[in-house]
């Protein structure tokens, strides 16, 4: 079985907060029960990409060696607190000849804040074909560095935007931590990044409605990727109705290889008055 031993490269200047590898370094409390004990001082609400990445890390600790995640689907149920630990409980639904299915529940204060279904697969040789090219964007090396809020250990570069938006819908990103040669860790880092920004930023509203909290989130992992190298994330809106919006996204390597796709539904309504 896969062990959740401490990850390498965890030394970090305390003034910058915890690193991404520290956030993924879970404590195994008991069989199928894990705790994310690294917290933030005076933080905002818990970032959805963080709890999703940690849930994937916990699930990956229970599958046979050599199986990697190929898809996940999570639901955000309550706002989490980044100043307190999160408990992850894994249910082993099935281990087949080449697939493993897991369910993960994330808890704080005895309440479920997030749940996830994730499937793992033993990679197999076969047809490898990509239908559409990567979105057009200048190489990241020629772009000025920028920072996206709530991301730890991630460097970003902004190419020209497809449309003027408050939040970027197309950007380069890479992890600045020295990541191990572990496909699960790289999938967790990709999951961490996948919830940032919003594809709904490109949809204008005549009223006070605006993109809000994530409701549910899905990721499909198509090919292996190194997240300490540049990837291009591109988010595309599709529809808004009933106080909710839905968008999709892709992640490509700097060579244009499609490594993952995502879909998300999020609130799209006027902010509630306090």
Image: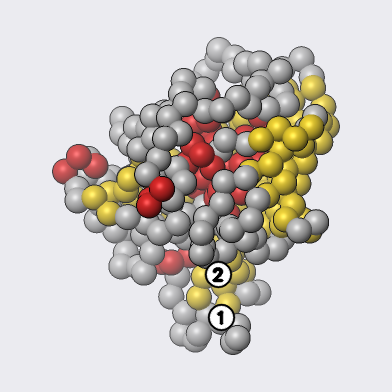
**Is 71 placed above or below 136 here?**
above
x and y, in percent, of residue 251 in the image: 43, 41
Quick one: label 2, few (<14), some, or many (20+) residues within 10 Å? some
Residue 150, labelled with which disc?
A: none
Question: Looking at this rendering, what residue extends furthest in the top direction?
Answer: 125
Q: Residue at x 71, y 38 (%)?
A: 34
- Of residues 194 and 30, the one nearer the viewer is 30
**Is 207 placed above or below 103 here?**
below
Quick one: label 1, few (<14), some, or many (20+) residues within 10 Å? few
Quadrant of the image occupied by residue 68? top right
**Is 211 placed above or below 271 here?**
above
Measure the C-alpha gap from mark 1 to mark 2: 8 Å
x and y, in percent, of residue 254 in the image: 31, 34
Residue to which mark 1 is pinned:
271
What secondary structure is found at the residue carrying circle 1? loop
Residue to which mark 2 is pinned:
212
Q: Is residue 128 visible?
A: yes
Image mark count: 2
What secondary structure is found at the residue carrying circle 2? strand
**Side of 241 where 200 appears, left or right:** left
- Of residues 48 and 4, the one nearer the viewer is 4
**Side of 169 where 36 appears, left or right:** right
């Amino acid at each position: 079985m896969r062990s959740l031993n401490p990850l390498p490269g965890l030394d970090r200047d305390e003034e910058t907060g915890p690193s991404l590898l520290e956030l993924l370094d879970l404590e195994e409390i008991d069989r199928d029960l894990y705790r994310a004990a690294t917290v933030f001082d005076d933080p905002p609400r818990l970032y959805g990409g963080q709890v999703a990445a940690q849930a994937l890390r916990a699930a990956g600790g229970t599958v046979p060696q050599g199986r990697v995640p190929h898809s996940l689907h999570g639901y955000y149920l309550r706002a989490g607190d980044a100043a307190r630990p999160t408990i992850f409980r894994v249910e082993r639904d099935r281990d087949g000849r080449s697939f493993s299915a897991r369910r993960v529940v994330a808890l704080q204060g005895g309440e479920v804040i997030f749940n996830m279904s994730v499937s793992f697969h033993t990679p197999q040789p076969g047809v490898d074909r990509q239908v559409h090219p990567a979105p057009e964007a200048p190489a990241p090396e020629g772009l000025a560095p920028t920072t996206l809020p709530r991301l730890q250990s991630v460097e970003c570069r902004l190419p020209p935007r497809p449309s003027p938006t408050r939040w970027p819908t197309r950007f380069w990103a890479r992890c600045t931590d020295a990541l191990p040669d572990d496909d699960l860790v790289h999938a967790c880092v990709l999951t961490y990044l996948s919830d940032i920004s919003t594809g709904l930023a490109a949809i204008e509203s005549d009223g006070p409605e605006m993109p809000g909290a994530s409701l549910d989130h899905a990721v499909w992992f198509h090919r292996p990727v190194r997240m300490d190298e540049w990837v291009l994330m591109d988010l595309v809106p599709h529809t808004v109705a009933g106080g909710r919006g839905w968008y999709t996204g892709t992640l490509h390597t700097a060579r244009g290889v499609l490594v993952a796709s995502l879909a998300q539904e999020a609130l799209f309504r006027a902010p509630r008055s306090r």
